[in-house]
Each structure stands twice: as C-alpha cells, then as structure tokens.
Image (cartoon, rainbow, N blue to C red):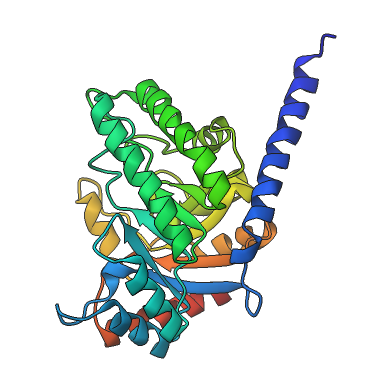
Amino acid sequence: MRIGRREFLITSAIAAGSLHAAAGRLAADEKPTEKKFKKAVKIGMIRLKPESTLLEKLQLLKELGFDGVELDSPSQVTVEEARRAIGETGVKVPGVVDSVHWNQRLSDPSEEVRAKGLEALRTALKFCKEIGGTSVLLVPGKGTSDANYDQCWERSIAEIKKAIPQAEDLGIHILIENVWNDFLIDPRETARFIDACGSAIVGAHFDIGNAVRYSPPHEWIPILGQRIKKLDIKDYKRPAEGGNLGAGFSAKLLEGDVDWPRCMAELRKIGYSGWGCAEIQGGGREWLTDVASRMDKIFAS
C-alpha cells in the first residue's frame, strides 16, 4: 500500500511522539512530587578544602537548600562513598556526567578510542544506577578535521546504539547535551539526532546557556519538547564583536542574555518538571548561597 508524503510525515511524528511519551514514563521516578523544580549543582562547583570529603560537600549543599548534585563518572568516587553521602544528607544524585566524552570521543576516527569512550559510557550507566540516579549526560562527539559533520553523526550514533540495550535494562537515560562542539548546534538537528538513536531512553540534557551563541534558548525548548529530561542552568553574555566568546560564561545567573521568563514559559508549555543543575564557576559557601538564590528566582520567573 502506498502512502503520500503527508501521511508518512504524520505517521513518523506520531511514532516519535510515542517514543518520547514512553521516555516520560521511564523517567517518572525523577519527577519531583513536592515542587515542580529541584535545583542541583555539578560536583566541581563545590570549592572547599582540598581534603573535603563528598559527605562534607553534600552536607553544605543540604544546608544551602540544594536538592541534588551531579557527579562525574568514571571518577575516584566509589559507589559506597556516594551511597553513604546520599544516605546521610538526603541530597540526591539525579544523574552523572560522562567524564571522558571530550577526550575519548564517540566520533573519533580511531576504533580503539571509540571503544574506550563506549566503555566509559557503560561504566557511567552502571554507576548511575547503583547510586540511584536516572541519567548520564553525554557529549556525543566533536566536529574536527578528521570527523566532519556526517562522520560525527554516523560514528556517534553507532556507538550510542551499542549502549542502548544496557541503558534500557537499567532504566538510565542517555541524555545528549548541546555544547560548543561544532556538532548539533541547531535544535532541529539535535532533535533529529536523538530520534535517530531509535530509543526513548535517549533524550536531551538541555543546556540553556550554551544555546545562546547559536539562537535564543527559548526557541530550542518547543522543538526539543518532551525529549528534554534534564536542564543545565547557566547564563551567557554575548561579547562585543571580535570579543572573547568564552568570556560570556562569566556572567552570573540572571545577568546574561538568557530571557529566563520566556524559557520558563516555554518549559511550562511542554509540561517540564524536574531537575535544573547549575553549571557555572564554583565557589564556597557564600558563592553557592548566591547561586541557590538566583536559581530560585529563575524557577519562579
């Protein structure tokens, strides 16, 4: 039976919607019950004494009103250490960040390098499950002289598909982050990439500040839609023409070019509720207190 292009597009859209509705069900346990948004920070943002333990860092977060922290994996933190700190403080680890995805890229031309990257992703998935998290943040590749856009696409999807059965068995999402990697810098391409992985277990860890360089982040949200399972919270101030692009990340939350009320409005439209994790410069008690206050204002906007 032949179907027209319009019917094919409608059928494809319905199928994609079904995949990500299923993803929402898989992620149901990460949805906050007592409030719409929960705030977290990346572990590297907590700047205490060099000898400070994970438990001490989580105790500080608890005092300051944070709900969670994202750890790195692979890392020196053991499952036992993480479980103890989580158990004694009540501070959750909603997800972990693949710690080698920039150096052992899934888009690398070397099969050996890609294999190491895949093994690290598998390690992160297992670690995340064992400490009660629900997702692994992944940068899928980087456009380079030996990995053009098409190669980056094909290589990284092939490796991600190898990890999908494990991720599905564990119930741990693989979440693609939008970064400055000369790859997936457009929301439609990012959505298409996620769908091409062929599983509802793959979604988006949407970094709001990272999007500013390419297009307003509030324009990404309706396009990514239900694919968004976690948020990174950062701001970005566009530099003057010819200025240092990286310097734009020094802007404090609420002091950059992100239109936070519009972002929050778009997030409400897609029914997002869940974790927002700050990914900005770190500091001690005073700095993190200010970060917590600014995140509260963002979520309330």
Q: Position of residue 221 (x, y in %)?
A: 57, 51
Q: Is residue 62 above or below residue 264?
A: below
Q: Position of residue 145 (x, y in %)?
A: 22, 24
Depth check: give the residue in front, 90 or 186.
Answer: 90
Residue at screen point 22% across, 58% down = 247
Q: Is 158 left, or right, of 52 in this rendering?
A: right
Q: Quadrant of the C terminus?
A: bottom right
Q: Residue furthest left?
A: 50
Q: Is residue 21 above or below residue 81?
A: above
Q: How many marks?
A: 0
Q: Can the viewer see residue 80?
A: yes
Q: Quadrant of residue 83?
A: bottom left
Q: Can the viewer see residue 219?
A: no
Q: Residue furthest bottom?
A: 63
Q: Is residue 4 above or below residue 25?
A: above
Q: Position of residue 20 (x, y in %)?
A: 66, 45
Depth check: give the residue in front, 250 or 147.
Answer: 147
Q: Is residue 153 above or below residue 287?
A: above
Q: Quadrant of residue 116?
A: top left
Depth check: give the residue in front, 235 or 283.
Answer: 283
Q: Position of residue 173 (x, y in %)?
A: 52, 50
Q: Residue furthest front?
A: 80
Q: Residue furthest right?
A: 1
Residue at screen point 30% across, 32% down = 114
Residue at screen point 35% across, 59% down = 236
Q: Quadrant of the N terminus?
A: top right
Residue at screen point 24% across, 25% down = 110
Q: Quadrant of residue 69?
A: bottom left
